[in-house]
Image (cartoon, rainbow, N blue to C red):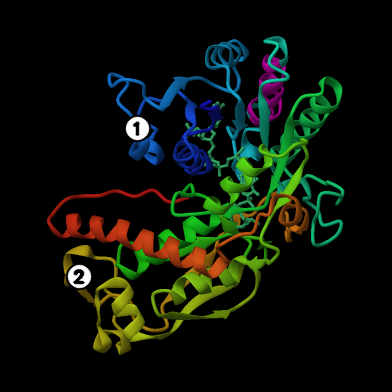
Amino acid sequence: MQKTALITGITGQDGAYLAELLLEKGYKVHGIKRRSSLFNTDRIDHLYQDPHVNNPQLILHYGDMTDSMNLTRIIQETQPDEIYNLAAMSHVKVSFDTPEYTANADAIGTLRILEAVRLLGLEQKTRIYQASTSELYGLVQAVPQSESTPFYPRSPYAVAKLYAYWITVNYREAYNMYACNGILFNHESPLRGETFVTRKITRAVAKITLGIQKELYMGNLDAQRDWGHAKDYVYAMWRILQQDTPEDYVIATGTTTKVRDFIAMAFDEVGFSLRWEGEGVDEVGILDAVNVEKFESATGLEWGADYANSESDDSSEAGKRELGKNNFIPLNSVLVKVDPRYFRPTEVELLIGDPSKAKTKLGWEPKYDVLALAQEMVASDLNLFKKDLQLQMAGHKIYYQEE
Ligand code: NDP
Ligand code: GDR
């Protein structure tokens, strides 16, 4: 019997990887997308199936986590065997600006899904995966963080997700539903949203080395995160719903990295070594040395050695740039600066997960480590911006927004 899955948040990073995985496994996949004034399905366009063709395996529905009637109707129509509730206002910093909306979508949205399944009498048919998060741990109580570590959320996002976590546990216990939390630590990929820290960094590395951007402005460089690859993590989501009994699991790599070190790692991919000077808001990352061979093979540009040693700074003028040549980044350029606007009112300083339970019970292990992740992300962003550079050189104007 073919299984049917419903993915909320299918247009997001995880939704895209999960949809791909479930289609490969032979599922019929329904996804909920939001109405937007522009197309918002970039991440899943490669999976799109023309609805005019017989029996498409991927079907999209308009919907929103804040609309109970909409969610109930979609669940009734699709009768899913598995629901993956990935939709959320997922940006921690933005949740301080939109706390009420975040609570509505992330906390009450989860309740809407659980209650719809119950009201429709699907408790014994439909299994539910809830996208819980390492942000629940917040202010460090103990490390590494496991399923039994106490929670101490530090943002409106994390508090909303705390409600979602417990309402999932409660529906499991109260109504004997198959509902599970995956407590996932940070996971990234070339599909990561542009305003999350890893992607912001890998985009900047690509743009700076290609001469499209001059500097990277960052927030807290000391924060430490347990970064994995989204591909590994969506596989864990699926595994969680295939067990005999519904349980909650931590999914993490078990190693942690400082933001500052991820920046250095990403620049190293293009042959740039940074040195750090100053402290706090005055800290800067300076181009200390270049591995010319590595730079040239990563970027396809020729390193402009003479210019690199000169005092001149006519950077960022695309018109003056010679195509195929780096003649715009002198050694000792300041490439990274701190901007307090990216600080959070309350910060989560240290996350490092203990995935032992997932390893033992799910047989799950990450395939990627943080270096392999950074490599893939930098390579992907270099490809992306090299295309833009070609267009710019041919006279097209391209505008960028970075946050
Ligand atoms: P993204 O931000 O990339 O994707 C979020 C998805 O939710 C998008 O499809 C978005 O739609 C959709 N969405 C947002 N608000 C609503 C709403 N009101 N109604 C319907 N859909 C909505 O997140 P990720 O893919 O990275 O994360 C997936 C889930 O996992 C999220 O719940 C996140 O909080 C959680 N999580 C993520 C971790 C990570 O490191 N990535 C770690 C732990 C948990 P649109 O495309 O239109 O914006
Ligand atoms: P996080 O991810 O808050 O952990 O939430 P993010 O990448 O936004 O931040 C990670 C850490 O980096 C620090 N930081 C910056 N962050 C951003 N976005 N931009 C900056 O310029 C910057 N400078 C430093 C942050 O302060 C933070 O400490 C992500 C989301 O995917 C959540 O949905 C998910 O639940 C958690 O991961 C696990």
Q: Which residue is located at x 53 percent, y 32 percent?
A: 9
* Extreme-front residue of the structure: 1
Mark 2, secondary structure of its residue: loop
In the image, 344: left or right of 323? right
Q: Residues within 10 Å of mark 2 (few under 14, many from 20)?
A: some
Identify the image quadrant of residue 387.
bottom left
In the image, 260: left or right of 269? right
In the image, 250: left or right of 42? right
Asked if residue 92 is among those painted magenta in the image, a careful observer would answer no
Badge count: 2
Residue 281 appears at what percent x and percent y?
62, 66
Identify the image quadrant of residue 319.
bottom left
Q: Which residue is located at x 38 percent, y 64 percent?
A: 379
Q: Residues within 10 Å of mark 1 (few under 14, many from 20)?
A: few
Residue 143 appears at what percent x and percent y?
82, 62
Which residue was labeled with disc 2? 321
Residue 134 appears at what percent x and percent y?
72, 49
Residue range corresponding to the magenta coloring: 102-117
**Residue type pointed to by label 2:** Arg
Mark 1, secondary structure of its residue: loop
Asked if residue 104 is among those painted magenta in the image, a careful observer would answer yes
**Residue type pointed to by label 1:** Tyr
Residue sitting nearer the eye, 225 or 76: 76
Which residue was labeled with disc 1? 48
